[in-house]
Amino acid sequence: MKYDFITVLDRTGADSIAANIDPWGVSPAPAQRIPMWVADMSFPTAPPILEAMHKRLAFPNFGYFSMPDEYFDCILRWQETRNGLTGLKRADIGYENGVLGGVSSAVQALTVPGEAVLLHAPAYIGFTHVLDNLGRKAELSPLRRDENGVWRMDYEDMDRHLKEHSIRLAILCSPHNPTGRVWERWELEKAMELYKKYNVYVVSDEIWSDIILSGHKHIPTQSISEDARMRTAALYAPSKTFNLAGLIGSYHIVYDPWWRDRIKKESSLCHYNSMNVLSMHALIGAYRPEGYEWADELCETLTGNVDFACDYIAKHFEGVHVTKPEGTYMLFVDCTDWCAAHSKTIQDVEKACWAVGAAVQDGVMFHGPCHLRINLASPRARIEEAFHRMDRYVFNAK
């Protein structure tokens, strides 16, 4: 490979939540801990991002600034090349101070406190936190696993929720976090037909849309139909693809002027929805041609990590089940049968993993009653070491 996905970074002392925090107080020294919980990556930053930031840092002034044409041109080119979005205009793009900030603005623009918003469960904890903070109710429609174990939307259940609760807004996660589903076109078409039937607006979180594993393809929600294009506010960011969460910065794509103006108004009310100049230049660097190559190699690396992890679980962890994700770098691992057979809780499992430095995450907060969420965005050697530790000391401990 041209880029470095092998070097093991010691992130301790480098402001890293994933590397420096131990919620259980039981894990070995940070240098021996393998972070597999917070959804960020342990790879060196893509070179074009560092080059763009260094170039800007070399100019010794950081006063007020405006977004150059290059910022918007990079987004337009990236979306057309990677996602096939044509006809996108600069006016359709707007800055958001993080995807969850965009979700918050959209929720406030269209609903009132006490109102229900449709979500699929398992659900990203960020969505439920936003709704709780805003006094809205998360109306959960569970995903179902089909005969092949693939997570699917339950359209009859969605229809019932939309009708019974007079829902006006739905949050769609595409690709889905935490299950890793990359929705097929027909699935999105059925969902958007339901939303059209009940005149429901949609916030589509597509922050994971660049992290698609081999054999799968992301379909932007807004590309499904003209109606979907106009009723959907899509949220994107380079932060997940290029591991820039610490710089903050995302953007929305909203075609309907009425919908867009409402969201922008809500975003403006806090007076904090302003871009950081270094975040802007990081995006410009990420969306240069070298960034395209880096992202492709990232997906190749992650596909290998996912294949290894899922095969290892199937061969070594009896009573533990996982549906192989199609996108993202997270596994959503069902430990129900193993816990029942060993009289353990999922918290017991999580704590035991942390005790040997495999720093995984409890899936209960994502509405997985006996699940772990495991981050595979680390060099393969670290992933293999973590699974060997979980094998020897947790799931097959003597």
Image (cartoon, rainbow, N blue to C red):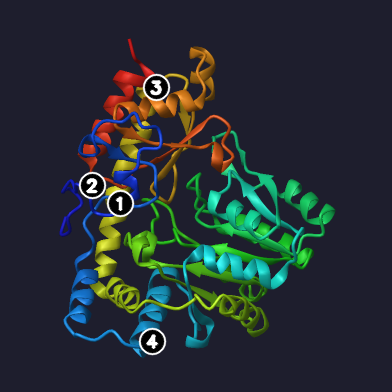
In front: label 3 or label 2: 2
Circle 3: element type:
loop
User: Is there a contact, CB below 8 Å, between mark 3 and mark 2?
Assistant: no
Taking the view exactly as shown, the residue that stands out farthest to the front is 25
Q: Which residue carries the number 1 mark?
A: 16
Residue 79 shows in this picture: yes
For label 1, count other residues whose C-alpha is less than 10 Å away and answer few (under 14), some (14-19) or many (20+): some
Q: Quadrant of the C terminus?
A: top left
Is 135 situated left or right of 94 in this image?
right
Q: Disc 1 versus disc 4: distance between alpha carbons?
A: 29 Å
The amino acid marked with disc number 2 is Thr
Q: Which residue carries the number 4 mark?
A: 67
Q: Which residue carries the number 2 mark?
A: 12
Residue sitting at x 41%, y 51%: 328
Q: Disc 3 versus disc 2: distance between alpha carbons?
A: 30 Å
In front: label 3 or label 1: 1
Is 355 situated left or right of 46 in this image?
right
Q: Nearer the viewer, residue 306 or 112?
A: 112
Locate residue 190: give its quadrant: bottom right
For label 2, count other residues whose C-alpha is less than 10 Å away and answer few (under 14), some (14-19) or many (20+): some
In front: label 1 or label 4: 1
Locate residue 212: give its quadrant: bottom left
Q: Which residue carries the number 3 mark?
A: 317
Circle 2: element type:
loop
